[in-house]
Image: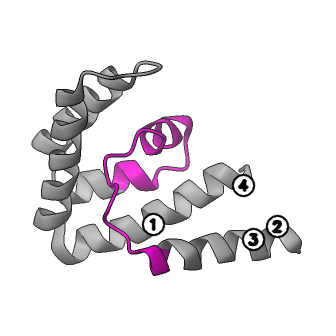
Amino acid sequence: MNPVDRFSYLLHLAIAEKLRQDGRRVIAVAIKNLDRWLSSGRFENGAELAYLEWRNILENSTTDEIIRLIKQQTDEGQRLRSSTPFTGILTKIERERIWSECAEVRLV
């Protein structure tokens, strides 16, 4: 796994934990993000389709199913993580801790 994909994967592991703790709030934030992005009308590289796909996933999947999707170590999981609607779920400190962990692995 390349460093960027590893960072994204580790972020999503932390997001999965937040989903376990308070799935309703996390999903509400993600849907609000998607609504804002979709209403902007500005999309690059097929982003609109990705946002619509995520909207469908969030509206029609259980929390456990969403967790399984974002934790998949497959091309599909990576593709979904690359258009994540979970912006704003992790704090700056949580993101920096994960970034430091990735940097440490790279130095070894």
Image location of residue 19, percent across then percent down: 25, 67
Residue 61: tell me if it is visible.
no
The residue that mark 1 highlights is 13
The front one of 94 and 36 is 36
- Rate crowding at label 2 as few (under 14), some (14 to 19) or many (20 or more) other CA atoms within 10 Å: few
- Rate crowding at label 3 as few (under 14), some (14 to 19) or many (20 or more) other CA atoms within 10 Å: few
Res 89 → quadrant: bottom left
Tag 3: amino acid: Ala
Determine the secondary structure under disc 2.
helix
Image location of residue 2, percent across then percent down: 73, 49
Determine the secondary structure under disc 4.
helix
Asked if the stretch drawn in magenta spans residue 71, the answer is yes
- Residue at the spot x=16%, y=46% of the render? 31
Tag 1: amino acid: Leu
The front one of 74 and 51 is 51
- Residue at the spot x=71%, y=50% of the render? 1
Q: Magenta segment, which residues?
A: 68-94
Lower position in the chain sequence, tag 3 or tag 4: 4
